[in-house]
Amino acid sequence: MADRLIENKSDTSSAVIRAVDILDVLCESTTPLGISALAKKLNMPKVTTFRILNSLVTAGLLFKDADDLYSLSPKFIIYGNRVNATLSLKNICEPIINELAAAVGENVNLGISYKRYVLTLFNVSVASYLLVANLLPLSELYCSSMGKVILSHMDDDSVREYFSHALEKLTPNTIVDYDAFQLEKDKFIKCGVMYDDEEFEYGLSCFAAPMYDANDHLIAAVSVSGPKSRILAKRERIEAQLLDAANRVTGILRTTGYTVEELQKTLA
């Protein structure tokens, strides 16, 4: 009896996966498709394909026309509108950032540009140390890795104007002039990761990577922070996983069409 239940669960799971595969193919197709074409594309028996198609039609997810060709139904418009209504940068990023924090064993922050500051949307704390574990909700651009990512995406005149103002040197490593920042920007362009070398607080270092919206505009930065000695000891692993997380978020934003303008609506 138990073996039969396990088998039934497996059959159900397989059917769901095959149904999703069919939906994916129809979503990518510019024209309706018939049973033979779908079965061939998915390397699936025609009988199985027919059975799943009928179930999807009954559920209202597919249309079947007079020529027995199948296409997605308008029901997906309702689903899409519902997803868009609940879409936010935070709920897109949160699962990936939680995964990143657990993988590297350090604290992770998500920040965006807001009125010449870094606005930290949220952070994940998995490590404790006698330093500032999380950035302030609003912090200066010049003295954090996320802020320097934002500065790196500003036009040159804006960056020059920013550094023309007197900036407080928080530690001996804090970068407060245009030329020194340009050297940091050059390194960032080559590797895709910005580094904060105890520029905000003694002993605290961060790596940050950019995230881009559907129009390839910078929308946010994600950083991993911790004691300098511990961070540097696993630098290569942190950088690789940080870039992977940032790229995954960028991929989702491009797929969903999420833009900086959508984010700004939530901040207005």
Image (cartoon, grey):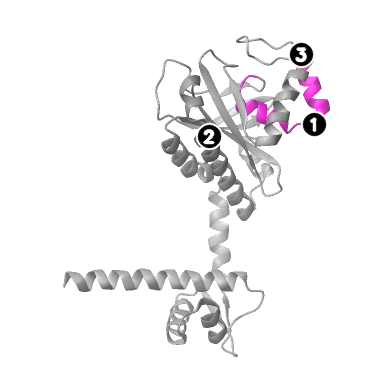
Q: To which residue does mark 3 refer?
A: 165
Question: Which SS does the magenta portion mostly show?
Answer: helix
Q: Residue at x 63, y 73 (%)?
A: 29
Along the line of sight, the residue nearer the viewer: 257 or 237: 237
Residue 136 visible from this viewpoint: no
Residue drawn at point x = 53 percent, y = 34 percent: 236
In the picture as drawn, the residue positioned furthest to the bottom comes out as 67
Residue corresponding to mark 1: 155
Residue drawn 54% across and 14% down?
201
Q: Which mark is residue 236?
A: 2
**Callout 2 crowding tier (Cα within 10 Å): few <14, some 14–19, many ≥20:** few
Q: Quadrant of residue 181?
A: top right
Question: Which image quadrant: the N terminus?
Answer: bottom left
- Indicate the quadrant where residue 218 lies: top right
Amino acid bearing label 1 = Asp
Judged by depth in the image, the label closer to the viewer, 3 or 2, is 2
Q: Amino acid at mark 2?
A: Glu
**SS at badge 1:** loop
Mark-to-mark CA distance, 3 and 1? 17 Å
Please tell me how many numbered marks the rendered image carries.
Answer: 3
Is residue 231 rendered to the left or right of residue 81? Answer: left
In the image: residue 242, left or right of residue 7: right
**Mark found first going from the N terminus, 3 or 2:** 3
Distance from Cα at disc 1 to Cα at disc 2 = 30 Å
Q: Are marks 1 and 2 in contact (CB under 8 Å)?
A: no
- Give the mark nearer the N terminus: 1 vs 2: 1
